[in-house]
Image (cartoon, rainbow, N blue to C red):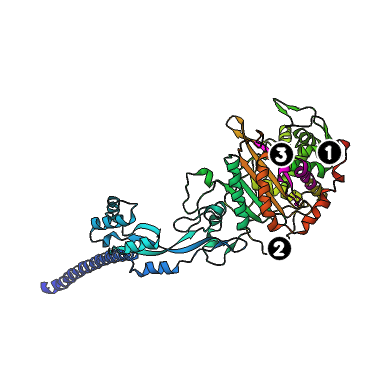
Amino acid sequence: MNKSILKTPFSVISRSITSWHKGLQYANVLESAKQRVMIVAAVLFLGFVMIALRLGDVMLLSGSNDDSLKKTESFRILRRNIVDQNNEILATNIITASAYVNPKKLLDLNDAARKISSVLKNVSASDLKKKFSSDKNFIWLARHIPPKLQQDLNDLGLPGLHMYRDQTRVYPHSSLFSHITGMCGLDGDGLSGLEQLFDIDLQQGADHLALSLDIRAQHILRTELQDGIKEFSALGGNAIIMKVKTGEILGMVSLPDFDPHKPNMTNIEGMFNKNTLGVYEPGSVFKVLNFAIGLETGKANLNSMYDGSHPIKMGRFTISDFRGLGRVMTLTEAFLKSSNIASVKMAQDFGLKTQKEYMKRFGVLDKLSLELPELGAPIIPKDWREPSLISVSYGYGVSQTPLQILTTITSIINDGKKVTPTLLKKTNMLNDKQESIVSSKTSRIVRKLMRQVVQEGTAKNAQVEGMSIFAKTGTVYKKGTKGYSKHQITTFVGGFPVEDPEIMMIVMLDDPKPTKESCGYAAAGWNVVKVAKRIIERVAPMYTTPNYLQNTVAFDTNKKDLSHSNTFKTSYKK
């Protein structure tokens, strides 16, 4: 056989295999090249994205020619105004300018720092140079600067120094409403008070936020409190005026206060709102609640008699009366003399369970609601037993905010209808359905008892000619680190007119001192009552209907339901 014939097919097969192998190698090389190209493309793409983002960041913070910053300026909405019930502006925004620098555009850092510090005054050239030497593209120089300073900075003609169209919150009446309006930060965000609670709502730029407050009443409260604090060398004071029927707060002042434009956060006393955050033992003003419970439950009436001839022993404590009668007394006498002994015996008559039930009904045990973030919670006995029954009956052993004390007593004298306090102006004058906490009969008797306190009791110095004022006073010792101290808080809670109350108020002085006129006494009747009288003299004409002045005499002489014993008639014989 011819060997060449046999060799030919194998040669062909060998060449084919060789060609196929070379083709496979080529394909692998091509695929590998494609992968490398894709990786390089991905890296380049990410690089371009990062560069674009960086350019955007630089453009945003580069200077006054940047469109983005201008859009930010133009689209900012002015914060809503806060106004009183008569549309007097209490808080508003004004357009200002703020200066900033892009250090990357400054030609000479030393020269720029020197020139800018010569205008700003409050920062050194060396400090500015340190800031300018950073990698930042945006540095604030000064926020909310006045026009003159703005012009002086512009006159420097420095590239990289720019003005931003800004806005700031201003309070035309400075500290007058500081604890209520609160304040805003540099960027316009609410930090306290109404500004904080309504922060999002105020940013919408819609209608004004209308309050129930009356700038006239607020001014009267503040000036009279200031005078009272000075007259009696007190550490501070606070006061609230409220409309009985609606719960609208007309004025609320706590002293010391603060300037919302320049708040000093280290000034704890000034930043602290005594009316809503401070919790205090109310003292004898709490006897209004105790007597209301006794009358409402039928465990006490105007014929009830209480023996005040002997102090009450409770463990190592002795409960007695300050300048008490030292004999059997009527319920009316007990209220007029603010008898601790009678209050305890009355509480023992209606009992522990009833006391706690009514305290719950009155709202004493719960935190009060109001349109402020600064609200204190009441302090109540953890173990409400006999000792608590006794101490709570005359205003110790439980602590409340002044607003809560005022609200509770206002509800009792408001024909027993529960009042909800508010700082917002009510547009609907129709009364909502109100919960009844005591009967109208009990409410009327309590008002008459409080009226007697002004006529013949511890609040005689609050009497204003032609006005049927009713009130209760309280003097309580402050708690110290080792029990009760010698320092006192004096309180006046009252209102007018007694027949159909329209206005209620609470006035408090922190640690008032005796004066020559007070004969060495520092009890409520000698100081805070006088402050309350001056407030009433100025406030009453603004809110009292004239015909009440005509009804005063008729109401005052109608005492037959308060005089059920010969002892009462002879004890207060004029």
Q: Amino acid at mark 3?
A: Ser
Q: Position of residue 317 (x, y in %)?
A: 70, 27
Figure quadrant of the C terminus: top right
Residue at image coords 60%, 54%: 219
User: Is label 2 or label 3 in front?
Assistant: 3
Chain part drawn in magenta: 447-476
Q: Which residue is mark 2?
A: 429
Q: Amino acid at mark 2?
A: Met
Say if 264 sits above or below 158 in the image.
Answer: above
Q: Name the N-terminal-most of marks 2 and 1.
A: 2
Marks 2/3: CA–CA distance: 34 Å
Marks 2/1: CA–CA distance: 44 Å
Task: Characterize the local packing of mark 1: few (<14), some (14-19) or many (20 or more) Cα atoms within 10 angstroms.
Answer: few
Q: Is residue 535 visible?
A: yes
In which image quadrant can residue 307 be found? top right
User: Toward the viewer: 197 or 263?
Assistant: 263
Secondary structure state at the residue bearing disc 3: helix
Q: Which residue is mark 1?
A: 573
Say if 8 sits above or below 489 in the image.
Answer: below
Residue at image coords 68%, 45%: 405
